[in-house]
Structure formats: C-alpha cells, structure tokens
Amino acid sequence: MRIHAFHHLYQQRLDRSTKPFVARGSKVVRCKYCQVAEKDCLCAHQPDVESGVAAMLLLSENEVFKPSNTGRLILDVVKDGYAYQWSRTEPSSEMLALLNSPKYQPIVVFPDEYVNEPARLIKQEASKFCEGKTPLLIFLDGSWREARRIFNKSPYLDALPVISINPDKVSQYMMRRSDNEQHLATAEVASLVFEQFGEEKLAQTLSSWFAVFRESYMNSKTRNRPDEAKPALNRFIGEMRNEKPL
C-alpha cells in the first residue's frame, strides 16, 4: 500500500498526544492506516489510479483520530495529496508555500450558499478554469460546524476561488449522524467535485472505495451483524481487475 500525507499527519499527532483520543468504537482493534477492524483490513486493496488533480485536506482538531473519517479515502486515490492540521493563527509554512506555488491553482471546496463574496465562485466549466495549472482542491475536513469555522477563520483562504456542488442524492454516509440528510461525507463531496473537473475515472474509483470502506466500517460495529460476503469489496476488486490491461 501507499503511505500518504494523512497517515503521516495521524502519526505526528499520535506522537504529540498526551492522552488517548477515545471515539465511538474505540474497543475495536483497528488497522492504523485504513481504520477498520484488523480482521477486515483494506490496505491490500488500496486503489492505484492516475489523475490530473491534487488534493489538500485541512483537518479540524480531532478529525484525524476519528475512525469514521472519510477524508483519508481521498488521499487513497489522489497520489498528489496533502494533509494539514488546521490552525487559524499558526498555519503550516509548508501548506502556505503550496498555496502560493506556481504549479497549482488552489480551489476551496465549499457550499456556495455560505460564500459571502459571489465573485469567488467558479461559474465556468471547472476543467477550463485553471489555465494549465494543476487544480489543488482544498477539502475542509471536520463536522459541518467545524468546516464553516475553518472557512470563515482562515485569512490565507480568503482570496482563493471556491467551487461548490449541488447534491441531488441523500448521503450514503451512515457512520455519523447529521441534522441535514443532504450533508455528504467528505469523500462523497470529493467524488462529485472530481466529476466537475472531468476526472470521471477518479470519481468512480473514490465512490466505489467509499462504499468498500463504509461496508467494512459498519461490519466492525459490535451491534451490527457483519456481512461476511462483503459485496462492495468484491465489486471493487472486480472493477479494478477489469481496468487492468490484459
């Protein structure tokens, strides 16, 4: 498997922690990379797909420790990926350098209805917006309340363009509760955004990988009766096998 930026951030935070983070399902013995039960570890099936986009996760305080986090799935499929702990006053210098790199066109992913400056919203076809630069898609990873705080309290994001989605389906995310059924998981949002940039294969791979993670995660819940047939995983394996050249 490929060790990526989310895994490195998780280990850095773990090394600095003075007490364990106790989340729901903390009694389950989990793989430290894919965060499902060790007996259902998915690391051997991590996707291997090429794309023309980059992705950055800005994570709220404890999001990196939550087994139900789906932002890591984005970096499982996007090889040019970055993950940083969000800070209002002490942002990572490495992150700021990326935002100013001539290689990238950074774009914040956020709902248009909460953007106070309409001029920031990308109205044209997304795939034509970046003018030869690699799109660096920035996902604010946390609860909806935390994501809004990151968006509104990060001066280094204020001048960046914003791309939004208009989901027309109920979220398939079952691991956490939300007051609004239209609030998608971070991975679901990313899949829809990738489609807007013409990255259909990447979008489909992430959507299928999300289904695999959801299936294995739900199987690890002690109150659930596990589905040992693992249909989502078997479908994913079949999809990946069919894409390989004969």
Image (spheres, rainbow, N blue to C red):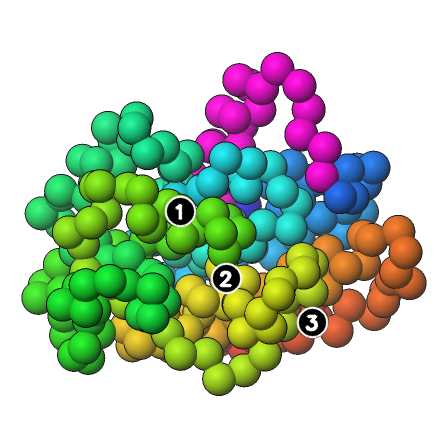
Looking at the image, which residue sits at the far top?
18
Which residue sits at x=72%, y=33%?
Answer: 22
Disc 3 residue type? Ala
- Estimate the x, y position of residue 152 in percent, counting from the top left: 31, 48
Element type where label 3 sits in the image:
helix
Point 58% across, 69% down: residue: 180
- Amino acid under label 2? Ala
Circle nearer the N terminus (2, 3):
2
Disc number lying in front (1 or 2): 1
In front: label 3 or label 1: 1
Numbered disc in front, either 2 or 3: 2
Work out whether residue 54 or residue 125 is closer to the camera in this orientation and state it. 125
Can residue 179 be seen here?
A: yes
Label 2 belongs to which residue?
A: 187
Residue 128 appears at what percent x and percent y? Answer: 14, 74
- Numbered label attached to residue 149: 1
Q: Quadrant of residue 223?
A: bottom right
Q: Amino acid at mark 1?
A: Arg
Decide which of tag 1 and tag 2 comes sooner along the chain: 1
User: How many C-alpha atoms fall within 10 Å of the one at disc 3: few (<14), some, or many (≥20)?
Assistant: some
- Marks 1 and 2 sit apart, C-alpha to C-alpha, by 20 Å
Label number found at residue 232: 3
Q: Position of residue 89 (x, y in %)?
A: 29, 28
Choose between 93 and 220: the one closer to the eye: 93
The Cα–Cα distance between marks 3 and 1, rounded to whole angstroms, is 35 Å
Q: Residue at 43% x, 51% y: name it.
A: 147
Q: Which residues are magenta?
A: 2-23
The quadrant in which residue 97 appears is top left
Q: Contact, CB < 8 Å: mark 3 with mark 1?
A: no
In the rendered image, is residue 209 in sight?
A: no
Instruction: Give the mark count.
Output: 3
* Dot 1: element: helix
